[in-house]
Amino acid sequence: MRAINASIMRAINRRMILDQIRLRPISRAELSEITHLTRASVTQIVEELINEGIVVESKVVGRMRLGRRSTQLDIPPNAGVFFGVHLSGARISVGCVNMRGEVLKHNMVVPAARSSTETMDAIAATIDQQRRSISLPLEKLQGIGVSIIGGESSAEMKHEIQEELAKRCGLPVVLEYDVNARALDEKYFGCAKDNFALIHLGEKISASVISNGSLYRGAEQGEVQIDRMATDANLAQGTLNDWLGEAALLQGTGCQSWEELMERATEEGASTAVERLKQYLAFGIVNIVHAFHVPHVVLCGEVFSSGDFLEQELYDKALQNGIDKNQLSIQIQRESNPVRIGASPAYHRFFQGGLED
């Protein structure tokens, strides 16, 4: 038992050191101070990472006490590759990113009435093709991240995808619901970082929370079920999803898409729907901010890509509904790459660990 515990602690310490080096070039002495590990422990783990080619000594920045030089450690972008699979209805994006989240390869796989077995075969074949074209040693291939639409995928389906893809590709697979993967993408490659809520508006409204750098998980280990949030005391007016799902908002407007709704936002019908969107989404923002004590809210989805005005107007409505102006910032995530979103769960596991460890 002691050996197992020591192994677990060593893995935790390794990830902690890696995560600090990921943030910026840093010396061994600074790592010891920040992580509260002994210099000997830090040195041993760092040497292993250097030998594996994950960490490099980037530069000497001066001298410390007793005349010792301070050498900075860094993670080069080609130290590892993560594959990303984004499953969204009939559209499947497959690609890979490097250690900095830069997309190296990107293919779109669109199965035409295929079985789940054929779909897994197509994804695995695409990953294999990309793996061969990267020309990196196999040990640099760190794993596969998969994002799937929440609510449409049971725990059994998640397990099947994870198991079948791992068997076909010979790599560890980490799977997350789409909104959680988007939150991890924002944490590592966006602006919000370690304390925020991400709200995605699509066919339904969904949310994820990053608190103190960790992904919040409810009883079912899934997303924050903001869609079930009540809009009144006895549910006579339904839930947030009854008002904010795509079909509900477009109904009666004559619009066929989010983009068209935003383009016609000042017209009768469309303007009513936009006001309804602002009213109920502000309600959801206020509740999630109070419930999870997060100072930042990130909004994403097609409706926000052309609705620049929503950012300020939602902020104003949130202030009107009991949020202090010093407690909240709202930003719209306008650009997100599906491959990087898919890869983010594997990236997160590599640096911080997760449920699959």
Image: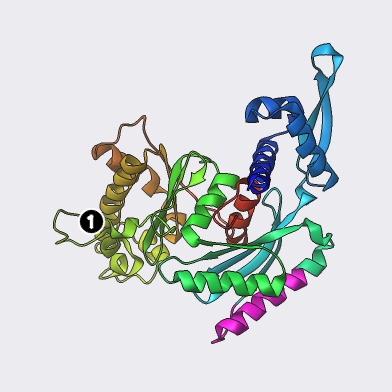
Please say if 13 is above or below 253.
above
Question: Looking at the image, which is closer to me, 38 or 291?
Answer: 38
| Residue under the image location 47 percent in, 67 percent down | 149
Q: Which residue is mark 1?
A: 230
Asked whether, in this view, residue 122 is left or right of residue 306, the answer is right
The residue at 37%/38% (across/down) is: 293
Inspect this view and state whether residue 267 appears: no
Q: Is residue 189 one of those drawn in magenta?
A: no
Side of 269 relative to 218 (left or right): left
Tag 1: residue type?
A: Ala
Q: Check disc 1 and report its element: helix, strand or loop.
A: loop
In this image, 88 relative to 72: left or right? left
Q: Which residues are magenta?
A: 110-130
> Looking at the image, can residue 151 be seen?
yes
**Picture residue at 53% right of the left edge, 70% below the top:** 159
Q: Residue furthest front?
A: 1
Front-lying residue, 333 or 206: 206
Q: Quadrant of the C terminus?
A: bottom right
**Where does the image place residue 262, in percent across and percent down from the top left?**
38, 59
